[in-house]
Image: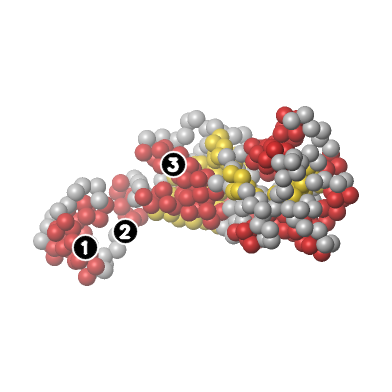
């Protein structure tokens, strides 16, 4: 493999000039840069990043440990991290724990094996001499077994550690639930149902709390029979909408878009029309929601911004050569996306 010295000799410049061309830290005349880049291409030069990291005690590597890479929320967060890090000259190493595919939704009986895999992932990242780590949760919750004794900065995205000792970036689910409810109230709805999520799930809990706060603010009663828990899938929406129709709600707030899809399916099969006989709002702004008929009003989660915010925290710590001292939580607001699934009653 070609070395920097060999590149320099063939280019007729100093090794330092070649290094400046490669790392971009100092300006190089355009003609010289082009000549060096041509030689680099001809000699098929590949930099040894790990050797550089050992010399500089810095690898320019950021590690990402994702609990589940195929979870809809993870790719945009990863993209947000990569976008900002690459602009600053950092590269990414990604580890996928396969949270759901290996351990399932209910992993209590497999907790020990999951924690072991999680611990190994952190060890592998440290063995690769990464400059910082972003841990991405599969969903919002308190994440156990997060190490606090790493020698590099660690930020949690879409979750937080059990004792909140590490910086974390999450969405403001409570405000999202509040905004949806306030929107429905502004259009004249007074009997508003909720479907979706597990009672133990933090996303569901916080969105329902926002719903309750909006009702209280507008002096509307909270009726527990209008709140239906079950799950996050189409069949859950299909199953739980019937009791709410018997309660004669005028609108239903589905805690994700798949649940809303189940409501659409039930209404269509029973000769009812979304936006006329029942107003429906979802959450997540999945790509298929624009194809619903009518298009679904829903809530967009700022997933890319979560990644960018987490990356910014990591890069700031690296630049200042310190570990995070002010843990805290960054909560990013969601955005209501208004389409055609909600009727105005007055």
**Which is more foreground, mark 1 or mark 2?**
1
Q: Residue at x 80, y 53 (%)?
A: 277
According to the picture, the residue beneath numbered tag 2 turns out to be 48
Quarter of the image with the C terminus in it: top right
Q: In 3D space, how far apart are the residues under numbered discs 1 and 2 (Cα atoms)?
A: 17 Å
- Residue drawn at (72%, 45%) of the image: 344
Nearer to us of marks 2 and 3 is: 3
The residue at the far right in this view is 246
Q: Quadrant of the N terminus?
A: bottom left
Q: Is residue 84 visible?
A: yes
Q: Residue at x 56, y 54 (%)?
A: 74
Q: Earlier in the sequence, mark 1 or mark 2?
A: 1
Q: Secondary structure at mark 1?
A: helix
| Helix, strand or loop under label 3 | helix
Q: Is residue 177 above or below residue 110?
A: above
Q: Nearer the viewer, residue 115 or 100?
A: 100
Q: Residue 121 in the image: x percent, y percent?
A: 54, 52
Q: Earlier in the sequence, mark 1 or mark 3?
A: 1
Q: Which mark is residue 37?
A: 1
Q: Does 92 sit left or right of 217 as displayed?
A: left
Q: Is residue 162 left or right of residue 321?
A: right
One can see residue 107 in this view: no
Tell whether 284 sits left or right of 197: left
Find disc 3 in the rendering and name its residue. Answer: 312
Q: Is residue 92 above or below residue 315?
A: below
x and y percentages locating residue 97 in the rendered image? 58, 56
Q: At x 76% / y 47%, what residue is drawn?
A: 252
Alpha-carbon distance for marks 2 and 3? 26 Å
């Amino acid at each position: 493999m070609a070395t920097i010295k060999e590149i320099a000799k063939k280019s007729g410049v100093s090794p330092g000039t070649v290094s400046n061309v490669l790392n971009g830290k100092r300006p190089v005349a355009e003609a010289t840069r082009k000549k060096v880049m041509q030689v680099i291409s001809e000699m098929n030069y590949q930099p040894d990043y790990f050797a550089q990291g050992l010399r500089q005690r810095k690898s320019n590597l950021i590690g990402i440990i994702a609990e589940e890479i195929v979870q809809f929320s993870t790719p945009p967060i990863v993209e947000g991290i990569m976008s900002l890090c690459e602009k600053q000259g950092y590269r990414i190493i990604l580890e996928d724990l396969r949270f759901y595919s290996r351990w399932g939704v209910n992993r209590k009986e497999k907790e020990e094996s999951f924690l072991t895999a999680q611990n190994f992932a952190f060890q592998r990242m440290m063995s690769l001499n990464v400059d910082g780590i972003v841990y991405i949760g599969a969903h919002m919750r308190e994440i156990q077994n997060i190490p606090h004794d790493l020698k590099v900065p660690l930020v949690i995205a879409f979750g937080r550690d059990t004792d909140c000792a590490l910086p974390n970036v999450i969405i403001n689910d409570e405000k999202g639930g509040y905004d949806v409810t306030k929107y429905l109230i502004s259009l004249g709805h007074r009997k508003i149902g909720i479907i979706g999520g597990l009672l133990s799930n933090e996303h569901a809990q916080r969105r329902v709390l926002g719903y309750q706060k909006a009702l209280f603010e507008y002096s509307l009663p909270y009726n527990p029979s209008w709140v239906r828990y079950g799950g996050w899938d189409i069949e859950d929406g299909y199953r739980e909408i019937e009791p709410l129709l018997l309660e004669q709600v005028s609108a239903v707030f589905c805690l994700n878009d798949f649940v809303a899809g189940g409501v659409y399916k039930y209404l269509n099969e029973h000769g009812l029309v979304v936006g006329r006989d029942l107003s429906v709002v979802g959450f997540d702004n999945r790509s298929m929601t624009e194809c619903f008929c009518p298009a679904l009003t829903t809530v967009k989660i700022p997933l890319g911004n979560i990644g960018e915010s987490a990356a910014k925290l990591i890069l700031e710590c690296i630049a200042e050569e310190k570990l995070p001292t002010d843990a805290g939580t960054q909560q990013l607001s969601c955005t209501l996306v208004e389409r055609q699934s909600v009727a105005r009653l007055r």
